[in-house]
């Protein structure tokens, strides 16, 4: 999103499970950008050196994101009015799920 100020941007690791049921995180080509309107997922294409929209993301209705933090497995958004929203990436369809 080049038309909005970026509050946070970072790589999102992909969670995988072994046949024994043990989970681990591996690098992925997915990145997340948080803006005042929400969080958006993009896929980085190394061959082309560009980003493409991967999923519609998570948008806020009626509130604004005032601060954000991204780590390899979670996204935390601070909204106007003091509300915090924690998001994680769903491993099945690479969409956001609200954790808190």
Image (tube, rainbow, N blue to C red):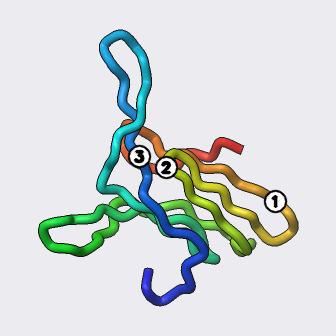
Which residue matches tag 2?
72
Q: How many C-alpha atoms fall within 10 Å of the one at disc 2: few (<14), some, or many (≥20)?
A: many
Kindly state the secondary structure of the residue where label 2 is placed: loop
* Nearer to us: label 2 or label 1: 2
Upstream in sequence: badge 3 or badge 1: 3
How far apart marks 2 and 1 lie (CA) works out to 22 Å
At 62% from the left edge and 46% from the top edge, which residue is drawn?
A: 98
Mark 2–mark 1 CB contact (< 8 Å): no
* Nearer to us: label 3 or label 1: 3
At 55% from the left edge and 53% from the top edge, which residue is drawn?
A: 71
Residue 67 position within the rendered picture, expressed as x and y whole percent measured from the top left: 71, 70
Residue 73 position within the rendered picture, expressed as x and y whole percent measured from the top left: 51, 45
Q: Residue 67 versus residue 1: which sits nearer the camera?
A: 67
Residue at the left extreme, as displayed: 47
How far apart marks 3 and 2 lie (CA) works out to 5 Å
At 24% from the left edge and 74% from the top edge, which residue is drawn?
A: 50
Which residue matches tag 1?
83
Residue at the top extreme, as displayed: 20
Upstream in sequence: badge 2 or badge 1: 2
Kindly state the secondary structure of the residue where label 3 is placed: loop
Is 51 drawn above or below residue 77 in the view shown? below
Mark 3–mark 2 CB contact (< 8 Å): yes
Which residue matches tag 3?
13
In the image, 52: left or right of 65?
left
In the image, 56: left or right of 54?
right
Q: Quadrant of residue 85?
A: bottom right
Q: Quadrant of residue 84?
A: bottom right
């Amino acid at each position: 999103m080049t038309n909005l100020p970026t509050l946070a941007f970072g790589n999102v690791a992909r969670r995988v499970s072994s046949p024994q049921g043990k989970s681990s995180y591996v690098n992925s080509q997915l990145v997340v950008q948080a803006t005042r309107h929400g969080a958006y997922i993009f896929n980085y294409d190394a061959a082309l050196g560009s980003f493409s929209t991967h999923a519609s993301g998570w948008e806020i209705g009626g509130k604004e994101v005032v601060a954000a933090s991204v780590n390899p497995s979670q996204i935390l958004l601070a909204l106007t009015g003091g509300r915090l929203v924690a998001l994680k990436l769903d491993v099945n369809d690479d969409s956001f799920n609200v954790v808190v």
